[in-house]
Image: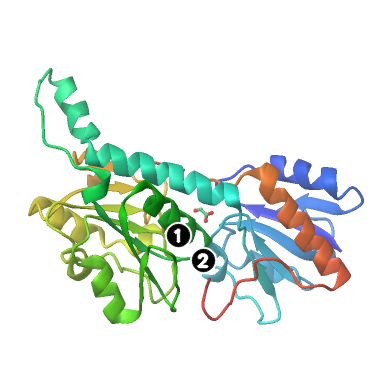
C-alpha cells in the first residue's frame, strides 16, 4: 500500500514532508515519480491531469486536498467502488469568513471607490451602508456556508441562505429548491456564492438570477468560475443594476491578461486565495483517512459521487 500525491498549481513537497512525518513507514511518492503504480491505494489530489488515476489499478481512495472535489470528479473516470473524500476543516471555514467579511465591509464603506478617488486626488464623500440595513444571501450551506451564515448573523446582518436540500439554522432564513432560490435572490443586497460545482449549479450566477437582486446589488463568488456567466455580470454592471463584484475564482486560472475583468473598476479580483487548506490541520485528516483505509474503518468526509459534493 502506498500514497501518491498528484498536484497541479500547488507545491506537493510540503505535503509529502508533513505526511511522511506522521506515516513514517509508508511510501509517499509525488506523481509522476511512482516506482510501483500497482502498490498505490491512496491518492492525494489537487486538479489532477485528465485520467491520470486510471494507471493506479488498486486505487481505493482519492482524497482532495481542498474543500472541493469537482477537479477530481470531472477529470477522472473513477470506478464507483473508489471512495472520494474532501477536507472539512474549521480553519478553512474561518478563513473564508474573514475573507468575506473584508469584502463585504469594504463594499459597504466603498473602499475601492475611494481607492480610485485617491489615485486622482479627488475628495469625494459618498453615502455608505450599515450592517443592520444589509441583507446577505448565501448560496450553499455546507460546512463553510453554514459557518459564514451563522457568523454574519451574529454581526447583525440579515442573512438568507439556500441549499439543495432542506436545512435549518438559527436566525438564518433558509430556503431550498427552485422557488427557494428566488426568495434568496429577491430583496437581497449582497449575494455570496459558496456552492459546490455540479451540473445543477453551473452557470447559476446568470442574468435571470442576478437581476433579481436589489438595485446596486453586489456579488461575491468564492465557489467556482463556472458558476458565473461572465458576460451576464458585465451586462448587469453596465446597466448599473449591480454595483460591483468580488471574484476569487475564474473559469480560467490564472485569469488571462486580456480578460475584461482586469480593467473593470467595479470588479475586485483576488487570485483564488479566499480560503486555502492549512497543511498543519488538514494533514491530520489525510493521515486519519489513510489509517482508516488500512484498518477497514469508515473514512472522514466522504463525498457522494452521484451528488458531486
Ligand atoms: C478551494 O478552492 C478548495 O476547494 O478548497
Q: Nearer the viewer, residue 220 or 182?
A: 182
Q: Is residue 104 left or right of residue 239?
A: right
Q: Give the residue number, with chain letter if any, for mark 2.
A: 70
Residue at the limit of the structure toward the right, as seen here: 25
User: Quick check: can you spot residue 87?
Assistant: yes
Q: Is residue 274 visible?
A: no
> Can you tell which of label 1 and label 2 is closer to the viewer?
1
Please say if 221 is above or below 10: below
Q: Residue at x 14, y 57 (%)?
A: 236
Residue 87 lies in what quarter of the image?
A: bottom right
Circle 1 SS class: helix
- The alpha-carbon separation of the residues under discs 1 and 2 comes to 17 Å
Residue placed most toward the observer, 91 or 67: 91
* Colour approach in the figure: rainbow
The residue pinned by badge 1 equals 145
Q: Point out the tag, 1 or 2, that comes first from the N-terminus.
A: 2
Q: Nearer the viewer, residue 158 or 94?
A: 158
In depth, the one of 74 and 181 nearer the eye is 181
Residue 79 screen position, x and y as percent: 66, 80
Residue 49 percent location from the top left of the image:
58, 60
Mark 2, residues whose alpha carbon is within 10 Å: few (<14), some, or many (≥20)? Answer: some
Label 2, secondary structure: give it.
Answer: helix
Q: Residue at x 18, y 66 (%)?
A: 207
Amino acid at each position: 500500500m502506498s500514497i501518491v500525491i498528484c498536484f497541479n498549481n500547488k507545491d506537493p513537497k510540503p505535503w509529502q514532508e508533513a505526511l511522511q512525518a506522521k506515516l513514517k513507514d509508508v511510501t509517499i511518492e509525488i506523481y509522476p515519480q511512482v516506482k510501483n503504480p500497482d502498490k498505490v491505494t491512496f491518492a492525494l489530489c489537487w486538479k489532477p491531469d485528465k485520467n491520470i488515476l486510471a494507471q493506479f489499478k488498486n486505487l481505493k481512495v482519492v482524497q482532495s486536498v481542498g474543500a472541493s472535489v469537482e477537479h477530481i470528479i470531472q477529470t477522472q473516470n473513477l470506478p464507483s467502488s473508489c471512495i472520494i473524500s474532501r477536507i472539512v476543516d474549521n480553519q478553512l471555514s474561518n478563513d473564508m469568513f474573514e475573507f468575506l467579511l473584508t469584502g463585504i465591509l469594504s463594499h459597504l464603506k466603498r473602499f475601492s471607490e475611494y481607492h480610485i478617488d485617491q489615485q486622482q486626488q479627488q475628495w469625494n464623500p459618498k453615502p455608505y451602508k450599515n450592517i443592520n440595513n444589509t441583507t446577505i444571501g448565501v448560496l450553499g450551506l455546507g460546512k463553510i456556508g453554514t459557518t459564514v451564515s451563522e457568523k454574519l448573523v451574529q454581526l447583525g446582518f440579515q442573512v438568507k441562505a439556500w441549499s439543495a436540500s432542506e436545512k435549518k439554522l438559527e436566525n438564518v432564513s433558509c430556503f431550498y429548491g427552485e422557488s427557494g432560490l428566488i426568495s434568496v435572490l429577491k430583496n437581497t443586497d449582497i449575494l455570496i456564492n459558496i456552492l459546490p460545482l455540479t451540473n445543477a449549479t453551473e452557470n447559476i450566477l446568470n442574468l435571470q438570477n442576478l437581476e433579481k437582486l436589489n438595485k446596486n446589488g453586489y456579488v461575491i463568488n468564492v465557489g467556482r468560475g463556472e458558476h458565473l456567466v461572465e458576460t451576464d455580470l458585465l451586462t448587469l454592471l453596465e446597466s448599473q443594476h449591480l454595483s460591483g463584484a468580488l471574484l476569487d475564482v475564474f473559469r480560467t486560472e490564472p485569469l488571462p491578461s486580456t480578460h475584461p475583468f482586469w480593467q473593470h473598476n467595479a470588479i475586485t479580483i483576488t487570485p483564488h486565495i479566499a480560503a486555502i487548506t492549512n497543511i498543519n490541520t488538514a494533514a491530520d485528516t489525510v493521515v486519519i483517512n489513510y489509517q482508516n483505509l488500512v484498518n477497514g474503518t469508515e473514512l472522514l468526509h466522504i463525498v457522494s459521487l452521484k451528488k458531486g459534493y
